[in-house]
Image (cartoon, rainbow, N blue to C red):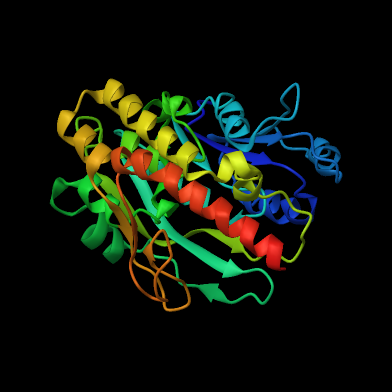
Amino acid sequence: MEIKLSIFIPVYNEAAYLEQCIASLQSNHSAAFEVILSDNHSNDGTYENLQSINDSRFKIVRPPRKLSPLKHHWFAFNHCKGEYVFFIGGDDYFEDGIIDRIIPNLQNNKIIFGLMRCFNDKDGTTMSICNDREFLIEKIFFKNNFIHNYLNQISHDEILYAFVPKKLLKNGHRIFGNCLETFLPWIGFLVFTHKSVIKEIVYLDETIFHKRYNRTYDNVGSFMKDQTTGIWASSYTVKSIKSFINCFIFFFQNYDIKSFLLLLFRNRSMERPKTHKGGFLQWGEYGQRNWYLGPVFMVILSPFIDVFKLYKLLINNLYS
């Protein structure tokens, strides 16, 4: 049977959660989807547990050596054979039977959205994450001005948790990771500016999957933690240069000069709850809108910020 959908799941040390993720996928009866489970050389029994799956829809792969989180993401993606793709973490899980209901909607290059329930793993409470229909229409996709709108909501990478035609992501691996916006928003810029391809964005008013935050088990792999480890990776100069380069990668994919200039020069910002600091680079008050400059200006300013951070670190160490 033709594979309509590929769900790819890069995992590392996620044995504590994978059983629930796998069971949620096996609750579906369709043979028109596949699951690519790629283990990045876990040492907690994850790979051995995956080997015991007895379901022809599941493909277990492993890179020749441990990769960076971003490279492992694309390694898993490259094993997908479906017309559409969807990506989650091994500690997430789907609503039972949802894939059976999604597959008939995957046609005519439409992008399919649905609700994503985010929850605190330590107490089970649902967290407030904006990906409902009202938010997407009013804040992100209104007036056919996606890039302008998204630069005002840059923290909402949950819009990438959608069922997307695979061909729209074929050049995503060229994007640099660990830049000012991480790699997910940049994939969003590539995907959602294909106006000639996307005939319609479809929103399903039901929960698609459940995403964990504040996980109970500390030894579970973390994409963001592994991606940002070390002084070099946390340097604003490095992040800014990568964002600057991503602007040119974007341009050479679609030759859209207006969008290119917006990405180069326009400030980024995002709403912040009262429990989080805002202001420039989160140096302001709690609840204040967070913002930072566009890549051109950040490339100029970042060396001074990094020197200031290093100075503060040295002072704190001297007087601690």
Up-down relation of residue 95 to residue 227 (above or below)? below
**Residue 11: percent from the left, percent from the top?**
69, 42
Q: From the viewer's perspective, is 211 left or right of 181?
A: right
Residue drawn at point x = 25 percent, y = 32 percent: 194
Q: From the viewer's perspective, is 299 left or right of 58?
A: left
Up-down relation of residue 53 to residue 15 (above or below)? above
Q: From the viewer's perspective, is 152 left or right of 12?
A: left
**Residue 206: percent from the left, percent from the top?**
42, 63
Q: From the viewer's perspective, is 116 left or right of 245?
A: right
Quick one: 282 or 102, which is closer to the camera?
282
* Image quadrant where one finds the C terminus: bottom right
Up-down relation of residue 315 to residue 174 (above or below)? below
Please say whether residue 113 is visible from this viewpoint.
Answer: yes
**Residue 228: percent from the left, percent from the top?**
60, 45
Up-down relation of residue 132 to residue 4 (above or below)? below
Residue drawn at point x = 70 percent, y = 61 percent: 317
**Residue 133: percent from the left, percent from the top?**
30, 62
Res 192 quadrant in image:
top left
Count of numbered badges drawn on the protein:
0
Residue drawn at point x = 25 percent, y = 30 percent: 197
Residue drawn at point x = 48 percent, y = 26 percent: 173
Quick one: 162 or 250, which is closer to the camera?
250
Please say whether residue 180 is visible from this viewpoint.
Answer: no
Quick one: 210 or 258, which is closer to the camera?
258
* Image quadrant where one finds the N terminus: top right
